[in-house]
Image (spheres, rainbow, N blue to C red):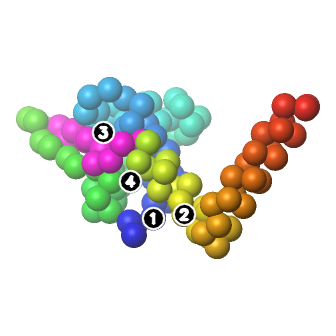
Amino acid sequence: MEEKISPCEEQIMLTVWEEAGEPDMREVMELANRRYNREWKPQTISTFLSRLVKKGFLTSSRKGRRMYYHPVKTLEDYRRGKIADIVTELYAGDRAAAARDLSEHEKEAELQ
C-alpha cells in the first residue's frame, strides 16, 4: 500500500501531471497558483515537492541550478488506486455495491 498524500500535495501532483515534460519548481508554482486560485510561495511549493519525492510520487533531477520533477506513476494509475481505496473504505471492498451506487448517481444526474 502506498503512502497517502494530502489534498494540497494532490493538487501539486495534478499540476505536474498536467504539465508536459519535467516542470521546475517555479513552473509548478505558477500553474498550481493559477489553477487552484492559490498564493503559494516558492518555499511552500518546494516543501510539497520534497514530500512528494520522499513519498515516491515524484523523482527530481538537477540541471544547472534548477530542480526538475517527473511523476513516478501515471495519473491513470493514481486514479485507479484512489478508487480502490474508496471501494475498500466505504464499501468494505464490495465493487458491485460501489458500481451500483455510481450507476444510480449517474442516472439521477441525467434526470436533472
Tell me which segment is drawn in magenta: 66-75
Residue drawn where x is 54% and y is 31% of the image: 35
- Give the Cα separation between the discs numbered 3 and 1: 22 Å
Q: Secondary structure at mark 4?
A: helix
Residue marked by disc 3: 25
Residue marked by disc 2: 85
Q: Is residue 32 left or right of residue 90?
A: left
Q: Amino acid at mark 4?
A: Phe
Marks 1 and 2: which is nearer the front?
2
* Number of on-image labels: 4
The extreme bottom residue here reads 92
- Give the Cα separation between the discs numbered 3 and 4: 10 Å
Q: Quadrant of the N terminus?
A: bottom left
Q: Amino acid at mark 2?
A: Asp
Majority secondary structure of magenta residues: strand
Residue marked by disc 1: 4
Q: Are marks 2 and 3 in contact (CB under 8 Å)?
A: no
Residue drawn where x is 52% and y is 29% of the image: 34
In the rendered image, the vertical position of residue 10 relative to residue 33, given as above or below:
below
N-terminal of the pair, mark 2 or mark 3, is 3
Q: Secondary structure at mark 1?
A: loop
Q: Are marks 4 and 2 in contact (CB under 8 Å)?
A: no
Q: Position of residue 11 (x, y in %)?
A: 49, 45
